[in-house]
Image (cartoon, rainbow, N blue to C red):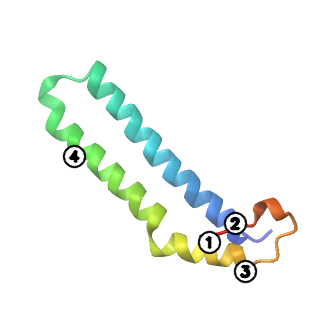
Amino acid sequence: MSVTAYDQLCDTAREVALLTSTESALSWDQETFMPAKALTFRASQMSWLSGKAHALATGRMMEKLLDKALESKLRDPKQRPTSK
């Protein structure tokens, strides 16, 4: 079975969600359990995760996947994005 544009779009959206939820967990840990001396490293971790999620969500690859999904002939109209 071939991978559709919709499948690729969903995979990328899941990756963005994974990155942002990981950042949220690190943020919670920072506020509740993290030793004070770990602050600089934690800030680097959170910054990297945030940047990676933003790049995936707003980058050229996402734009191409949305375009492909819009152009595809999906059987289920719910799978077609309505806009970019």
Q: Residues within 10 Å of mark 4 (few under 14, many from 20)?
A: few
Residue at the extreme top: 33
Q: Earlier in the sequence, mark 2 or mark 3?
A: 3
Residue occupying the point 37% across, 57% down = 52
x then y, percent, for residue 20? 44, 45
Q: Inspect the image, locate mark 4, and give the three-letter code of the amino acid beneath it.
A: Ser
- Mark 4 or mark 1, earlier in chain: 4
Residue ID for mark 4:
44
Image spot of residue 14 (x, y percent): 57, 51
Mark 3 crowdedness (10 Å alpha carbons): few <14, some 14-19, many ≥20: few
Residues at marks 2 and 4, CA–CA distance in whole angstroms: 34 Å
Q: Secondary structure at mark 3?
A: helix
Residues at marks 3 and 1, CA–CA distance in whole angstroms: 9 Å
- Tell me where residue 74 appears, x and y as whole percent: 82, 71
Q: How far across and how far down the image is residue 53, in percent? A: 42, 55
Q: How many marks can you see?
A: 4
Instruction: Identify the secondary structure beneath mark 4.
Output: helix
- Residue at the disc numbered 2: 81
Rendered position, 8 above or below 44: below
Q: Which residue is mark 1?
A: 66
